[in-house]
Image (spheres, rainbow, N blue to C red):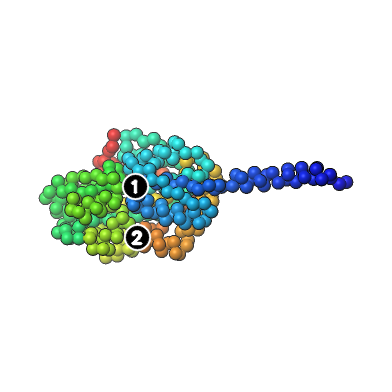
Amino acid sequence: MTLSRRALSGTLALLAAPRLAGAQDAWPSRPIRLVVPFIPGSAPDINARQIAEALGQRLGQPLVVENRPGAAGNIGFAHVARQVAPDGHTLLWATGSLSVNAALYARVEFDPLADFTHINLAFGMSNAVIVRADSPLADIGALVARLRADPRTPYASGGFGSAAHLTVALFLARTGTEAEHIPFRGAPDIVNAVRAGTVAFGMPQLQVALPLIRAGQLRALAVTSRERSPTLPDVPALAETIPGFDYISWMGLCGPARLPPAVVERVDGAVRDALADPAFRARVTADGTSIIGLGPAAFRDFLAADLERGREVVRISGARIE
């Protein structure tokens, strides 16, 4: 039995239909927006652009960074949680503010666990205690003595509830000191204010301060991680002066809730591939960033624990935003 040419054509069309539909539905079918809830030049923005370039090469579509700063990240977080379709063409570069803000703010428009798909916790970053290069504050002991003598000593942060704000607040609580908080819009403003002498000190992410530390315009008194940073091995950890002090920022990829599992698997795989690339690792860690690389399940478990840590840090610091 043979088929007519018309019947054969129809049969072939039916057989090809699923393949054609699959090709049309292939992800990603267009550039991917990567929402960064902080200003250009901030540590999250720098790392986001690094991972965006690496993922664009691996996913076959560019990742276009879209900065949506404000309210210590809440504006960008809420945008992705509430206004983005879960089709994989908009992702979020999340940070530790996602968990801290849930305790810091009286009200947020997102649930860190329920309103996002957690893909990969890629990086960690210590903060640095910085002063001007010509500052008489030679070490942490001298800074503590200054704060005890003058509780109105000004310090810069990246805004209420930012990592730099909470780190200093925790430092003040642990040392029993006070200082005058001068909030700015982001970490780049901290280093500029310290360099200009507008404030006495600040604790921005190490990545943002490092170029001016290396240029001799700023001096790092300590890093806020439990151990010294390989990038600045001669700079002590705060834990060497304040036992148990440990505060780092994390950064990773999320999406809106209900992101298709196939998209999650592919993005996570692309991140893992990038993090395993020696050239990429060397480029990222050169500025003090550490590689973490937790996949979806481990990332979500980490975030659940980090929400508890965030509540504790907010309680210790006494910070609260209504």
Residue under label 2, please give it. Answer: 287
Residue at the spot 36% in from the left edge and 36% down from the top edge: 108
Residue 129 position within the rendered picture, expressed as x and y whole percent measured from the top left? 24, 55
The image shows residue 240 at horizontal and vertical percentages of: 25, 59
Residue at the spot 38% in from the left edge and 47% down from the top edge = 95
Q: Nearer the viewer, mark 1 or mark 2?
A: 1
For badge 1, the amino acid type reads: Ile
Would residue 69 be found to the left or right of residue 234 on screen? Answer: right
From the viewer's perspective, is 63 left or right of 234? right
Which amino acid does the dot numbered 2 rest on?
Asp
Q: How many marks?
A: 2
* Secondary structure beneath label 1: loop
Q: Residue 203 versus residue 51: which sits nearer the camera?
A: 51
Query: How far separated are the C-alphas under marks 1 and 2?
Result: 18 Å
Question: Mark 1 highlights which residue?
Answer: 39
In the figure, residue 310 lies in which quadrant? top left
Quadrant showing the C terminus? top left
Front position in the image: 271 or 184: 184
In the structure shown, which secondary structural element does the residue marked by tag 2 occupy?
Answer: loop
- For this orientation, the residue located farthest to the left is 149
Q: Crowding at label 2, few (<14), some or many (≥20) Cα neighbours within 10 Å?
A: some
